[in-house]
Amino acid sequence: MSSSSLPRLGVGMIGYAFMGAAHSQAWRTAPRFFPLPFDVDMAVLCGRDEGRVRDAAARLAWHDVETDWRALVARDDVDLVDVCTPGDTHAEIAVAALEAGKHVLCEKPLANSVAEAERMVAAAEAAAAAHGVVAMVGFTYRRVPAIQLARQLVAEGRLGQVRHVRAQYLQDWIADPAAPMSWRLDRSRAGSGALGDIGAHVVDLAQFITGENLTGVSGMLETFVHERPVAAEHSGLHGTAGQGTAQVTVDDAAIFYGRLSGGGLATFEATRFAWGRKNAIRVEVNGSAGSLAFDFEDMNVLHLFDATEDTRTAGFRRIVVTEPEHPFVAAWWPAGHGLGYEHGFTHQVVDLLGGIASGEAPRPTFADGLQVQRVLAAVEESSTSGNRWVPIQETPA
Ligand code: SOE
């Protein structure tokens, strides 16, 4: 029983693998480092296998368990449903939770298709009107302090007009053809491969940093390894090979380019076949007055080039984004001590709860998630039609 004078907010989370563990850490940590408007109660964790979900709940600090997500959504002690399942279940769970008057946090990409994402946006709008609840999609990297600083600098005009965005998301966890099958390689569960799993992140980051949307794209998808060993065991991204093989039904890599609403050009690459690149999210922006560059593998650093400086001494400045003046940093460690992967998830919880308390929908909203979904669909369409240019329908924020 909590002694807090804050209103209680009961959280129910579905899924407890890699993303579920990251979200659990965030729910546990946010109240310990940030002043929050709610007393967070990690009420219930849901998974289909009772033994496993009980073990996970004990390990990750959830109070109770359910084995049917519908039972979790129906519970009176759950005010917010956190969806950490593969993409094929996002729409059904999120819509049911919103109809039941719960706030929703849903992992990315929002859905497996534009049609599903549209249904989710409609449900979020109806639930906001009927119950005053919010719906947010988990593009977590937005909440890395260096990314937030990048956006601030662009918004302040420090780069001038945006001419180029160069965005890459490079990993290598399936570069080995012997790496076993996983749900992320199964189209019926994940919707797409590198495109939706990691390409979605860099699309969101490019648009978030510049404050501009893609208006059209052309792209190419490729699957390098069509058959993989079935997984005997899976933990996080890695597994051990079992008996037999399974068909890979998604793209292994995606490359595409697009035009931004301000007229700039953007190029993207998303692959899990870049040996040696573990989680390299690289974004470079060139504007009329300067450039900035970020790489998640050095995530506490942002590089800034100011073209208005004396050319004899101008150069990329390496900004270590660990000062208390930097977004989110004051709540953590003294300057120079740095943050990691998990902090973005904690910041996501902080902003989500702030949005619930203020009544102002926290971004990225489901409409923002739908907009990214439209970009993913346009890349697929382009890839299957000889790299045709595919315009992207505007999505009202
Ligand atoms: C696997 O590619 C993955 O876990 C993605 O699904 C996540 O969104 C990304 O943050 C890390 O890599």
Image (cartoon, rainbow, N blue to C red):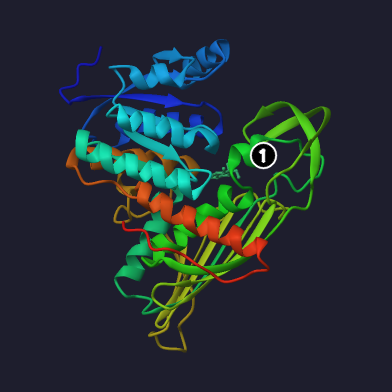
Q: Nearer the viewer, residue 271 or 135?
A: 135
Report the residue at 60% width, 36% height from top. 189
Q: Looking at the image, in which quadrant does ligand 1 appear?
A: top right
Q: Quadrant of residue 43?
A: top left
Q: Which percent across, then down, holds residue 397? A: 31, 56
Left or right: residue 269 compared with residue 214: right
Q: Amino acid at mark 1?
A: Asp
Q: Nearer the viewer, residue 107 or 17?
A: 107
Q: Which percent across, then down, holds residue 344? A: 42, 44
Element marked by disc 1: loop
Q: Is residue 40 above or below residue 146?
A: above
Residue 280 seen in this snapshot: yes
Report the residue at 56% width, 29% height from top. 17
Q: Looking at the figure, which quarter contains the N terminus?
A: top left
Left or right: residue 34 compared with residue 111: left
Q: Is residue 129 above or below residue 336?
A: above
Q: Which percent across, then down, holds residue 211? A: 36, 65
| Residue tagged 1 | 186
Q: Nearer the viewer, residue 142 or 374?
A: 374
Residue 61 seen in this snapshot: no
Extreme left residue here?
5
Q: Which percent across, then down, holds residue 358? A: 18, 42
Q: Nearer the viewer, residue 214 or 55?
A: 214
